[in-house]
Image (cartoon, helix red, strand yellow):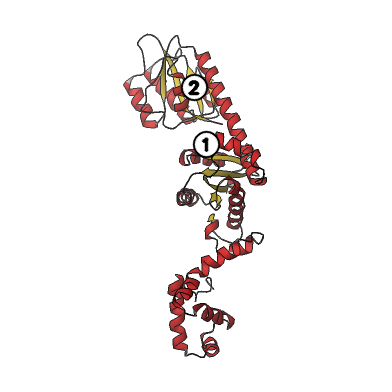
Amino acid sequence: MAVELKDLYAAISPQYPVRLHTDSCFGKMIAWMHVVEDIEFIASLHGEELVFYSGLSCTSEEWLKRYITELDRHHAGGLIMSFRGEETFSQEIIDYCNEIRFPVFSAAWTTPYIDIMRLFAEILLKNEQRETNLIASFKNAIYYPENEGSYLSHFERNGFLRDMEYIVIIISCHTYDDEAGNARLDKIEKSMRFILEKMIAYEEHGRLIILAAGSVLSRIQEEFGRLCRNDSNVYAGIGTVAEGVRDIYRSHENAYTAYQLTKTAIPKNLLCYDELGIYKILADTKEASIYPEFVQETLGELMKYDEENHTDYMEILEAYFENDCCAVHTAQALYCHKNTLSYKLDKIRRILGYDILKNENR
């Protein structure tokens, strides 16, 4: 589980003579550390490593630029390089690293790399244990919501508070599966960690399960909408907003319903549960609260209008459906002229905010 480079730098800057030369750490995440003394060994990096380099094999500015280029190409998270005396990176190298957004640090020749690496290892391992505990708590909140003791304390210790709003998102992109896993799914998780301020994520059965805390639903829809528009092989379902940790399980169930419908009934690769309409009824028969919510969502405005204005539009609509949506037969059943009925159906359409005469809306 990676840690932001800026946090690692903050941990060592008061203790060791290490200096950042680029404009920032560029939001880089660090999963581990390696000593790399020659360009040919860079290919063995997995990505997100902070590289320590003594500088002994550096023969020229051109060589150093090539070395940094290769580190960046293999997705290293940054470079700490030792210098003798007053030597340091040239302005040309610093400008190049700012251009490619690759953070570089200089260290004094006597800087104890082994002590820094030990400190970083402790921070990274502690963060990994924290993430492991949070993932376990997230799963408990999904599968054992009534047992708050199995997840609430870990949540609250790490800033996931009891009464925060939570949204679950489920994502897959099986097209990119291979023997080594799914690099595309890994990349999505890393990118979302920058976008969503507080989140927990784990992979299960080739799907990425994300818990977003304190994020606005519209922003989540926007970010995942952009992701799914840019890649038609990515499928995502967004759950409802949970008003506290005890309702996380419900958001997860709803996200899974929406996710499944992307692959079956609805030809879209992103679905938000709140926008499923009639499919909520078809897919979630076990959820009793759906029925009154669905009635309110689809007919609430018309019911409210009848109540406030003492009209009978709900009865007219019911008669319209009972007569197979035939205006002539409905007018006969209501003892009114078909033009009067047409006017009232148009009024119903305007009150509801959608065209009741369209087959899909019927």
Q: Nearer the viewer, residue 180 or 130?
A: 130
How crowded pointer 2 is (Cα within 10 Å; few <14, some 14-19, many 20+) is rated as: many
* Residue indicated by mark 1: 159
The numbered mark at residue 51 is 2
Which residue type carries mark 2?
A: Val
Mark 1 is surrounded, within 10 Å at the Cα level, by few (under 14), some (14 to 19) or many (20 or more) other residues, namely few
Q: Are marks 1 and 2 in contact (CB under 8 Å)?
A: no
Q: Secondary structure at mark 2?
A: strand
Position of the C terminus by quadrant? bottom right
Residue 39 x/y as whole percent: 49, 21
Q: Residue at x 41, y 20 (%)?
A: 105
User: Is 220 located above or below residue 59 in the figure?
Assistant: below
Is residue 354 something that shows in the picture?
no
Of the two numbered discs 1 and 2 in the rendering, the one whose residue sits closer to the viewer? 1
Q: Position of residue 11 (x, y in %)?
A: 47, 21
Q: Horizontally, is 95 left or right of 25 in the view? A: left
Q: CA distance from mark 1 to mark 2?
A: 31 Å
Considering depth in this image, is 309 or 128 the residue closer to the camera?
309
